[in-house]
Amino acid sequence: MNSPTKELLIAEIEKNKKELISLCSDLIKIDSSNPPGDMGEITSFITNFLSKHKISWEILDKTGSTPNIIAKTGPDSGCTLILNGHMDVVPAGDISKWDVPPFSGLVKDGVLHGRGATDMKCGIGGLLFALSMIVKHQVQLKGKALLTIVPDEEIGGPNGTKWLVENGITKGDACIVAEPSCHHNCEIGQKGSLWLKLIAQGKSAHGSLAPFAGDNAIEKLLKAIEAIRSVQDLQVFLPAKIEETMKLTKKVVREELLKQKGAEYILDHLTFNVGKICGGTKVNMVPDHAEAEIDIRIPVGLKADTVREKIEFLLKKSGIEGIQCVYNGYSDPNTTDQDEEIVETLAANVRAVADINLQKTFQWASSDTKFYRYAGIPTIQYGPANLEGIHSYNESVNIDEVVLCTKVYLGTIMDYLGYDT
Ligand SMILES: [Zn+2]
């Protein structure tokens, strides 16, 4: 039997866009905040959708409370395109700061509101809808579309993508991660990170005797933080082939995203944020213990190991005694070549659907995407976005953006895998 054309299916998405938006709204209505990370309800909702649309699925769960949904369509014989998204969202925070309830999934004036609207319930909704169209219209794919929806990206992904990829459970020739990027843009690289805890030990004494008695841990800690701050001066060696992408990303960050002169600095430098600090017992005691947690982001062109070595060198050079350095996870920056087939296929579909040239940029944060790239799988991030409310209040996304990205997902799946006509 002949498959319908790609153009016909894209027209079907336009015709059925109400159904698509209602699916995305329903996903937002389910509170899948992480923490606490209870994915039961949203897993049932998604697997019901898959069953209803005759897409085969299974649950793989490493811990008993972190379900990964794996769904597929198409034969094992051809190549495999992985489609990935996370079903957890960051907590809504102070509800009184939201203009509409965060789990309302309200659709109003062409905008869909709620926690996860951008990051990334609508990305998941778009992938699910595109696959349902392929199955419903009996497209004879020549390869396999492998959808993985994971439970824990917002807390680092140890039992989701990391586990699936590092154990060879998820394998493929290319991958689209439906993280928010905006319909005209795809991300082909991201920064690495290094989370560090500095622990200072001192000696307690009566506060009235300082500095002649005791050893103040808080003051030592502050000195240690200043001593390692110059890790930011580490030289970055940007590979020549990505210079153009970096230049474009800097322009986008400066003029469109952060709209602040000089903000492009964050892209090709280490950033250094002291995010948490605590210490001491009481005002009239010399503190004998203090801790600080620091979030360092590593640009493309540097390795996490180089950053660690430099921190240790700076601490030693400072001569401050009694400081312990604990690393709470670190990752290298990662990129996908912009000439990869998956990038070009997506670009062709963006051109066909929206009549614009796809912009290729780097991300200043990081995500599960790194695990695919570390495994050598060419991976891009592409998904509907309104970047203003991400990980903050009043998250939303434009409906047109969701429809457009869904059309691009469908076209890219069909073109990348090929189909019988
Ligand atoms: Zn995300």
Image (cartoon, rainbow, N blue to C red):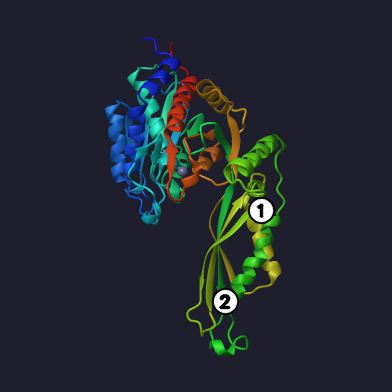
Question: With respect to residue 170, does 417 lie above or below?
Answer: above
Residue contact at pointers 1 and 2, CB within 8 angstroms:
no
Is 180 in front, or is 137? 180
Residue at numbered disc 2? 217
At 59% across and 71% down in the image, what residue appears?
Answer: 221
Q: Closer to the N terminus: mark 1 or mark 2?
A: 2
Quarter of the image holding residue 232? bottom right
At 57% across and 43% down in the image, what residue appears?
Answer: 257
Q: Does 325 sit left or right of 95 as displayed?
A: right
Residue type at mark 1? Thr
Residue type at mark 2? Ala
User: How many labels sit on residues?
Assistant: 2
Which residue sits furthest front?
Answer: 109
The quarter in which the N terminus is drawn is top left
Ligand 1: does it lie within 8 Å of the C-beta at label 2? Answer: no
- Distance from the alpha carbon under mark 1 to that under mark 2: 28 Å
Can residue 322 be seen from the camera position used here?
Answer: no
Quarter of the image holding residue 112? top left
Q: In x, y percent, where is residue 260?
A: 63, 48
Question: With respect to residue 148, does 290 lie above or below?
Answer: below
Q: In x, y percent, where is residue 132?
A: 35, 25
Q: Which secondary structure lies at badge 2?
A: helix
Residue at numbered disc 1? 306
